[in-house]
């Protein structure tokens, strides 16, 4: 897979640097070409060929977690956060993976249905937006795939809390003028939280390198996508939209942590969330920067 070029007109690429309107179409074409290299054959019925290859390879990673795992307690905590006290810190980390997967899957479904009515598929912008929505479904599968190391099978359908349903519903039905600044804020908050989880996984599983590496690679794979999603949504907003996104990002992160308290159980406290205000592209791992699309 070819590496992506990271560049902007500024000395240091930033989530909040504006995109010249005159360059927008060329950048969209470049991003589409990047998506073709990264995803392979992008067929909505058969799936994206290279992503399916990645999932098959990941499924073969034989690195069982060396420790006690209580599947019953895990599923009780999956159904109700009140039961999380029964879990070890390692199991809480896995639960956070699964819950992040569940919330993202719900959001993609709701937003996708609402946005389909607005798509003009003759335009490259909307073609890419649809591709990115399908890319998000791979994040669902990548994250939940971590359960293979713990011998846990998630039982039952996850029921999103009212607060999360309201947050995602607001995004799904926001007018076009507000949609992309809100989505950009959400994507930046997502990059921050996944990058934080990457660091926490390294700490929590430092004594089990095979499990740690598998979980880290899953998060890196998602971060590579999410950086591109930030770049794409920057193309849809002007300087005012960028300023709005910067102001909203911390609130979005607080909302996510409130609806998914597993993050807080894992250590995502107010001090950590406060760092989002100064968070930017250059703080991501070198591998993510090397592989991601960002302009």
Image (spheres, rainbow, N blue to C red):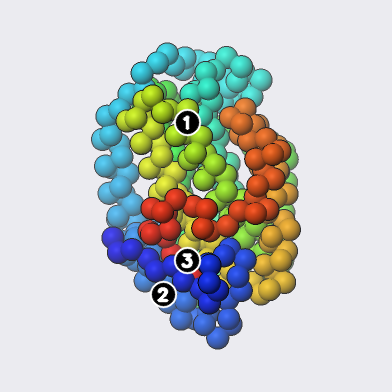
Which residue shows up at 69% across the image and 69% down it?
A: 241
Look at the numbered discs 2 and 1 and tell me whether their residues touch, using CB distance below 8 Å.
no
Q: Is residue 192 visible?
A: yes
Look at the numbered discs 2 and 3 and tell me whether their residues touch, using CB distance below 8 Å.
no
Does dot 2 land on a helix, a strand or a loop?
A: helix
The crowding category of the residue bearing disc 2, from other C-alpha atoms within 10 Å (few below 14, some 14 to 19, many at least 20), is some
Look at the numbered discs 1 and 3 and tell me whether their residues touch, using CB distance below 8 Å.
no
Does dot 1 land on a helix, a strand or a loop?
A: helix
For residue 294, the mark is 3
Which residue shows up at 51% across the image and 34% down it?
A: 200
Pointer 2 or 3: first along the chain: 2
What is the CA distance from the residue labelled 1 to the residue labelled 3?
28 Å
For residue 30, the mark is 2
Q: Quadrant of residue 120?
A: bottom right
The crowding category of the residue bearing disc 1, from other C-alpha atoms within 10 Å (few below 14, some 14 to 19, many at least 20), is few
Left or right of 54: which side holds 271? right
Does dot 3 land on a helix, a strand or a loop?
A: loop
Position of 246 relative to 218 (above/below): below
Q: Is residue 128 visible?
A: no
In front: label 1 or label 3: 1
Q: Which residue is mark 1?
A: 203
Which residue shows up at 68% across the image and 73% down it?
A: 239
What is the CA distance from the residue labelled 2 to the residue labelled 3?
10 Å
In front: label 2 or label 1: 1
Pointer 1 or 3: first along the chain: 1
Pointer 2 or 1: first along the chain: 2
Which residue shows up at 26% across the image and 42% down it?
A: 57
Residue placed furthest toward the front: 11
């Amino acid at each position: 897979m070819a590496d992506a070029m990271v560049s902007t007109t500024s000395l240091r690429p930033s989530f909040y640097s504006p995109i010249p309107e005159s360059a927008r179409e060329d950048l969209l074409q470049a991003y589409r070409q990047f998506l073709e290299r990264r995803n392979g054959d992008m067929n909505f019925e058969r799936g994206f060929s290279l992503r399916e290859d990645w999932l098959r390879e990941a499924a073969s990673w034989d690195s069982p977690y060396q420790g006690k795992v209580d599947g019953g307690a895990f599923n009780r905590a999956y159904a109700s956060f009140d039961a999380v006290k029964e879990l070890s810190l390692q199991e809480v980390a896995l639960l956070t993976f699964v819950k992040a997967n569940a919330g993202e899957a719900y959001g993609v479904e709701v937003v996708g249905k609402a946005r389909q009515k607005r798509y003009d598929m003759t335009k490259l912008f909307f073609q890419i937006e649809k591709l990115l929505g399908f890319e998000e479904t791979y994040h669902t599968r990548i994250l939940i795939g971590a359960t293979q190391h713990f011998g846990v099978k998630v039982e039952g359908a996850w029921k999103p809390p009212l607060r999360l349903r309201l947050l995602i519903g607001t995004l799904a039905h926001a007018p076009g003028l507000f949609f992309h600044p809100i989505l950009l804020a959400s994507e930046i908050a997502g990059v921050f939280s996944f990058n934080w989880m990457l660091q926490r996984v390294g700490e929590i599983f430092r004594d089990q390198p095979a499990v740690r590496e598998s979980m880290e690679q899953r998060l890196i794979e998602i971060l590579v996508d999410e950086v591109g999603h930030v770049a794409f949504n920057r193309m849809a907003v002007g300087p005012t939209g960028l300023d709005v996104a910067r102001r909203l990002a911390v609130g979005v992160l607080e909302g996510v942590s409130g609806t998914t308290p597993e993050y807080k159980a894992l250590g995502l406290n107010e001090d950590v969330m406060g760092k989002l205000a100064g968070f930017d592209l250059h703080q991501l791992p070198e591998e993510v920067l090397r592989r991601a699309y960002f302009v």
